[in-house]
Image: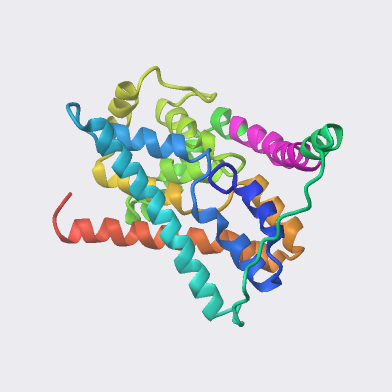
Amino acid sequence: MGFGCNAAGVVGCRIIDSPRERLIAILTNNFVPCNGRFPTLIAILTMFFLVEGAGSSLLSSVLLTAAIGLGIAMTFFASWLLSKTVLKGVPSSFALELPSYRRPQIGKVLVRSVMDRTLFVLGRAVAVAAPAGLLIWVMANVQVDGMSLLNHASGFLDPFARFVGMDGVILLAFILGFPANEIVIPNIIMTYLAQGTLVEMESLAEMKTLFVDHGWTWLTALCTMLFSLMHWPCSTTMLTIYKETGSKRWSALAFMLPTLCGLLACALAANMARLLGLV
Protein backbone atom coordinates (compact mmCIF):
# COMPACT_ATOMS: atom_id res chain seq x y z
CA MET A 1 0.00 0.00 0.00
CA GLY A 2 2.97 2.28 0.55
CA PHE A 3 3.54 2.47 -3.21
CA GLY A 4 0.29 4.41 -3.42
CA CYS A 5 0.61 6.40 -0.20
CA ASN A 6 2.98 5.78 2.69
CA ALA A 7 0.37 7.06 5.16
CA ALA A 8 -2.06 4.41 3.90
CA GLY A 9 0.72 1.83 4.16
CA VAL A 10 1.30 2.77 7.80
CA VAL A 11 -2.41 2.39 8.55
CA GLY A 12 -2.38 -0.97 6.76
CA CYS A 13 0.18 -2.25 9.29
CA ARG A 14 -2.71 -2.67 11.74
CA ILE A 15 -3.29 -6.18 10.36
CA ILE A 16 0.03 -7.37 11.89
CA ASP A 17 -0.69 -8.99 15.26
CA SER A 18 2.82 -8.72 16.72
CA PRO A 19 3.38 -5.19 18.18
CA ARG A 20 7.12 -5.51 17.54
CA GLU A 21 6.76 -6.50 13.89
CA ARG A 22 3.98 -3.97 13.35
CA LEU A 23 6.36 -1.25 14.57
CA ILE A 24 9.14 -2.49 12.27
CA ALA A 25 6.76 -2.35 9.30
CA ILE A 26 5.65 1.19 10.24
CA LEU A 27 9.22 2.46 10.60
CA THR A 28 10.37 1.04 7.25
CA ASN A 29 7.32 1.72 5.08
CA ASN A 30 8.73 5.03 3.82
CA PHE A 31 11.58 3.33 1.95
CA VAL A 32 9.24 2.38 -0.90
CA PRO A 33 8.39 5.34 -3.19
CA CYS A 34 4.84 6.65 -3.01
CA ASN A 35 2.93 8.27 -5.86
CA GLY A 36 4.30 11.66 -4.79
CA ARG A 37 7.88 10.56 -5.50
CA PHE A 38 7.32 8.70 -8.76
CA PRO A 39 7.00 11.91 -10.89
CA THR A 40 10.36 13.16 -9.58
CA LEU A 41 12.07 9.82 -10.21
CA ILE A 42 10.58 9.43 -13.69
CA ALA A 43 11.35 13.04 -14.73
CA ILE A 44 15.01 12.84 -13.66
CA LEU A 45 15.44 9.41 -15.26
CA THR A 46 14.02 10.71 -18.52
CA MET A 47 16.11 13.91 -18.55
CA PHE A 48 19.52 12.55 -17.56
CA PHE A 49 19.71 8.79 -18.07
CA LEU A 50 17.89 8.08 -21.33
CA VAL A 51 18.89 8.47 -24.97
CA GLU A 52 16.41 8.60 -27.81
CA GLY A 53 16.18 5.60 -30.05
CA ALA A 54 15.18 1.97 -30.09
CA GLY A 55 14.94 0.44 -26.67
CA SER A 56 14.57 3.74 -24.78
CA SER A 57 11.20 2.69 -23.33
CA LEU A 58 12.65 -0.63 -22.19
CA LEU A 59 15.66 1.12 -20.66
CA SER A 60 13.45 3.57 -18.77
CA SER A 61 11.40 0.68 -17.40
CA VAL A 62 14.54 -1.16 -16.29
CA LEU A 63 15.99 1.92 -14.59
CA LEU A 64 12.74 2.73 -12.79
CA THR A 65 12.39 -0.89 -11.72
CA ALA A 66 15.96 -0.77 -10.40
CA ALA A 67 15.12 2.33 -8.34
CA ILE A 68 12.04 0.63 -6.92
CA GLY A 69 14.08 -2.51 -6.24
CA LEU A 70 16.60 -0.44 -4.30
CA GLY A 71 13.78 0.93 -2.14
CA ILE A 72 12.49 -2.58 -1.46
CA ALA A 73 16.01 -3.78 -0.65
CA MET A 74 16.47 -0.91 1.79
CA THR A 75 13.15 -1.84 3.40
CA PHE A 76 14.40 -5.37 4.04
CA PHE A 77 17.80 -4.12 5.24
CA ALA A 78 16.28 -1.57 7.64
CA SER A 79 13.83 -4.18 8.93
CA TRP A 80 16.69 -6.61 9.57
CA LEU A 81 18.74 -3.89 11.27
CA LEU A 82 15.88 -2.89 13.56
CA SER A 83 15.12 -6.51 14.43
CA LYS A 84 18.74 -7.01 15.50
CA THR A 85 19.08 -3.77 17.51
CA VAL A 86 16.35 -1.65 19.08
CA LEU A 87 13.51 -4.08 18.29
CA LYS A 88 15.01 -7.45 19.14
CA GLY A 89 12.63 -10.34 19.57
CA VAL A 90 11.51 -13.72 18.34
CA PRO A 91 9.87 -13.61 14.89
CA SER A 92 6.25 -14.66 14.90
CA SER A 93 4.36 -16.56 12.24
CA PHE A 94 2.09 -14.49 10.04
CA ALA A 95 -1.41 -15.75 9.33
CA LEU A 96 -4.04 -13.69 7.55
CA GLU A 97 -7.48 -15.16 8.07
CA LEU A 98 -10.19 -14.66 5.49
CA PRO A 99 -13.30 -13.05 6.97
CA SER A 100 -16.69 -14.69 6.82
CA TYR A 101 -18.51 -14.24 3.54
CA ARG A 102 -21.37 -11.77 3.96
CA ARG A 103 -23.44 -9.68 1.62
CA PRO A 104 -21.68 -6.30 1.15
CA GLN A 105 -23.27 -3.39 3.00
CA ILE A 106 -22.72 -0.62 0.46
CA GLY A 107 -23.61 2.25 2.80
CA LYS A 108 -21.32 1.02 5.56
CA VAL A 109 -18.45 0.47 3.13
CA LEU A 110 -18.79 3.98 1.69
CA VAL A 111 -19.00 5.63 5.10
CA ARG A 112 -15.98 3.76 6.44
CA SER A 113 -13.95 4.41 3.28
CA VAL A 114 -14.77 8.12 3.21
CA MET A 115 -14.78 8.91 6.91
CA ASP A 116 -12.18 6.51 8.33
CA ARG A 117 -9.66 6.58 5.52
CA THR A 118 -10.03 9.45 3.03
CA LEU A 119 -11.07 12.36 5.23
CA PHE A 120 -8.67 11.72 8.09
CA VAL A 121 -5.71 11.58 5.67
CA LEU A 122 -6.84 14.75 3.88
CA GLY A 123 -7.40 16.49 7.21
CA ARG A 124 -3.86 15.76 8.34
CA ALA A 125 -2.49 16.89 5.00
CA VAL A 126 -4.33 20.21 5.16
CA ALA A 127 -3.24 20.79 8.77
CA VAL A 128 0.39 20.93 7.66
CA ALA A 129 0.04 22.02 4.02
CA ALA A 130 -1.68 25.33 4.78
CA PRO A 131 1.01 26.79 7.10
CA ALA A 132 3.76 25.25 4.95
CA GLY A 133 2.34 26.92 1.85
CA LEU A 134 2.37 30.25 3.67
CA LEU A 135 6.00 29.68 4.70
CA ILE A 136 7.05 28.94 1.10
CA TRP A 137 5.30 32.10 -0.15
CA VAL A 138 6.96 34.26 2.53
CA MET A 139 10.42 32.84 1.83
CA ALA A 140 9.98 33.35 -1.92
CA ASN A 141 8.72 36.93 -1.69
CA VAL A 142 10.46 38.53 1.31
CA GLN A 143 13.73 40.19 0.27
CA VAL A 144 16.77 40.71 2.51
CA ASP A 145 19.84 42.48 1.08
CA GLY A 146 18.45 42.14 -2.42
CA MET A 147 17.88 38.38 -2.21
CA SER A 148 14.86 36.34 -1.21
CA LEU A 149 14.87 34.29 1.97
CA LEU A 150 14.84 31.21 -0.28
CA ASN A 151 18.18 32.21 -1.79
CA HIS A 152 19.67 32.97 1.63
CA ALA A 153 18.54 29.59 2.98
CA SER A 154 19.78 27.67 -0.07
CA GLY A 155 23.13 29.45 0.17
CA PHE A 156 23.45 28.41 3.81
CA LEU A 157 22.71 24.76 2.93
CA ASP A 158 24.88 24.71 -0.19
CA PRO A 159 28.23 23.50 1.29
CA PHE A 160 26.70 20.46 2.96
CA ALA A 161 24.40 19.77 0.00
CA ARG A 162 27.36 19.73 -2.41
CA PHE A 163 29.17 17.27 -0.16
CA VAL A 164 26.29 14.83 -0.67
CA GLY A 165 26.13 15.45 -4.42
CA MET A 166 23.33 18.02 -4.67
CA ASP A 167 23.16 21.79 -4.12
CA GLY A 168 21.51 24.07 -1.59
CA VAL A 169 18.46 24.68 -3.77
CA ILE A 170 17.74 20.94 -4.12
CA LEU A 171 18.15 20.24 -0.41
CA LEU A 172 15.97 23.22 0.51
CA ALA A 173 13.32 22.03 -1.98
CA PHE A 174 13.16 18.69 -0.16
CA ILE A 175 12.83 20.47 3.20
CA LEU A 176 10.04 22.72 1.91
CA GLY A 177 8.48 19.66 0.26
CA PHE A 178 7.74 18.16 3.68
CA PRO A 179 3.97 18.73 3.24
CA ALA A 180 3.95 16.82 -0.07
CA ASN A 181 6.66 15.21 -2.18
CA GLU A 182 4.94 16.44 -5.34
CA ILE A 183 6.18 20.03 -4.81
CA VAL A 184 9.91 19.25 -4.66
CA ILE A 185 10.56 19.82 -8.39
CA PRO A 186 8.33 22.97 -8.53
CA ASN A 187 10.27 24.33 -5.52
CA ILE A 188 13.57 23.78 -7.35
CA ILE A 189 12.29 25.52 -10.48
CA MET A 190 10.85 28.43 -8.48
CA THR A 191 14.16 29.06 -6.71
CA TYR A 192 16.28 28.77 -9.86
CA LEU A 193 13.99 31.19 -11.71
CA ALA A 194 13.69 33.52 -8.68
CA GLN A 195 9.91 33.41 -8.96
CA GLY A 196 7.54 34.27 -6.13
CA THR A 197 5.16 31.37 -6.81
CA LEU A 198 5.42 27.70 -7.73
CA VAL A 199 5.77 27.25 -11.48
CA GLU A 200 5.93 24.37 -13.93
CA MET A 201 8.02 24.00 -17.09
CA GLU A 202 6.33 23.31 -20.41
CA SER A 203 8.58 20.36 -21.28
CA LEU A 204 11.24 18.12 -19.80
CA ALA A 205 13.76 19.45 -22.34
CA GLU A 206 13.21 22.99 -21.06
CA MET A 207 13.52 21.76 -17.48
CA LYS A 208 16.76 19.92 -18.24
CA THR A 209 18.23 23.04 -19.82
CA LEU A 210 17.38 25.02 -16.68
CA PHE A 211 18.94 22.40 -14.41
CA VAL A 212 22.10 22.03 -16.50
CA ASP A 213 22.49 25.83 -16.60
CA HIS A 214 22.51 25.74 -12.79
CA GLY A 215 25.25 23.12 -12.60
CA TRP A 216 23.40 19.80 -12.72
CA THR A 217 25.39 16.78 -13.91
CA TRP A 218 24.54 13.09 -14.07
CA LEU A 219 25.87 12.84 -10.50
CA THR A 220 23.54 15.60 -9.28
CA ALA A 221 20.64 13.76 -10.89
CA LEU A 222 21.68 10.43 -9.36
CA CYS A 223 22.02 11.86 -5.84
CA THR A 224 18.71 13.71 -6.16
CA MET A 225 17.04 10.44 -7.13
CA LEU A 226 18.66 8.60 -4.23
CA PHE A 227 17.54 11.27 -1.78
CA SER A 228 14.05 11.31 -3.27
CA LEU A 229 13.92 7.57 -2.70
CA MET A 230 15.27 7.77 0.84
CA HIS A 231 14.42 10.79 2.96
CA TRP A 232 12.01 11.77 5.71
CA PRO A 233 8.31 10.87 5.39
CA CYS A 234 5.89 13.58 4.30
CA SER A 235 3.82 15.45 6.88
CA THR A 236 0.73 13.26 6.47
CA THR A 237 2.77 10.09 6.95
CA MET A 238 4.54 11.54 10.00
CA LEU A 239 1.23 12.45 11.64
CA THR A 240 -0.11 8.98 10.83
CA ILE A 241 2.98 7.32 12.33
CA TYR A 242 2.56 9.35 15.50
CA LYS A 243 -1.13 8.40 15.73
CA GLU A 244 -0.42 4.71 15.13
CA THR A 245 2.53 4.46 17.55
CA GLY A 246 1.49 7.11 20.09
CA SER A 247 5.19 7.81 20.62
CA LYS A 248 7.35 10.81 19.79
CA ARG A 249 10.44 8.61 20.06
CA TRP A 250 9.31 6.13 17.41
CA SER A 251 8.07 8.97 15.21
CA ALA A 252 11.50 10.62 15.45
CA LEU A 253 13.16 7.31 14.51
CA ALA A 254 10.80 6.98 11.53
CA PHE A 255 12.01 10.44 10.44
CA MET A 256 15.71 9.87 11.02
CA LEU A 257 16.12 6.31 9.69
CA PRO A 258 15.40 6.93 5.97
CA THR A 259 16.98 10.39 6.12
CA LEU A 260 20.31 9.11 7.44
CA CYS A 261 20.26 6.25 4.92
CA GLY A 262 19.59 8.72 2.09
CA LEU A 263 22.33 11.14 3.13
CA LEU A 264 24.81 8.29 3.55
CA ALA A 265 23.94 6.82 0.13
CA CYS A 266 24.29 10.24 -1.54
CA ALA A 267 27.59 11.00 0.21
CA LEU A 268 29.04 7.62 -0.80
CA ALA A 269 27.90 7.93 -4.42
CA ALA A 270 29.11 11.54 -4.77
CA ASN A 271 32.50 11.10 -3.20
CA MET A 272 33.23 7.77 -4.89
CA ALA A 273 32.47 9.37 -8.27
CA ARG A 274 34.77 12.29 -7.45
CA LEU A 275 37.49 9.97 -6.20
CA LEU A 276 37.35 7.94 -9.42
CA GLY A 277 37.36 11.09 -11.54
CA LEU A 278 33.96 10.43 -13.09
CA VAL A 279 32.86 14.07 -12.73
Q: Is residue 74 above or below residue 145?
A: below
Is there any visible trace of residue 166 in the rendered image? no
Answer left or right for 153 relative to 41.
right
Residue located at (56% from left, 56% from top): 29
- Tell me which corner region of the image, top left, top right, bottom left or bottom right, holds residue 201: top left
Q: Depth check: 157 or 121 in front?
A: 121
Q: Depth check: 58 or 128 in front?
A: 58
Number of residue marks:
0
For the record, the magenta segment spans: 116-137
Is there any visible trace of residue 33 in the rendered image? yes
Whether the magenta-drawn stretch holds residue 126 is answered as: yes
Q: Is residue 136 above or below residue 5?
A: above
Residue located at (61% from left, 82% from top): 90
From the top left corner, tell me how far across and down residue 22 is, in percent.
66, 66
Residue located at (71% from left, 52% from top): 240
Q: Is residue 266 above or below residue 37?
A: below
Q: Depth check: 243 or 158 in front?
A: 243
Residue located at (77% from left, 41% from top): 120
Q: Main secondary structure of the magenta part?
A: helix
Answer left or right for 167 relative to 232.
left
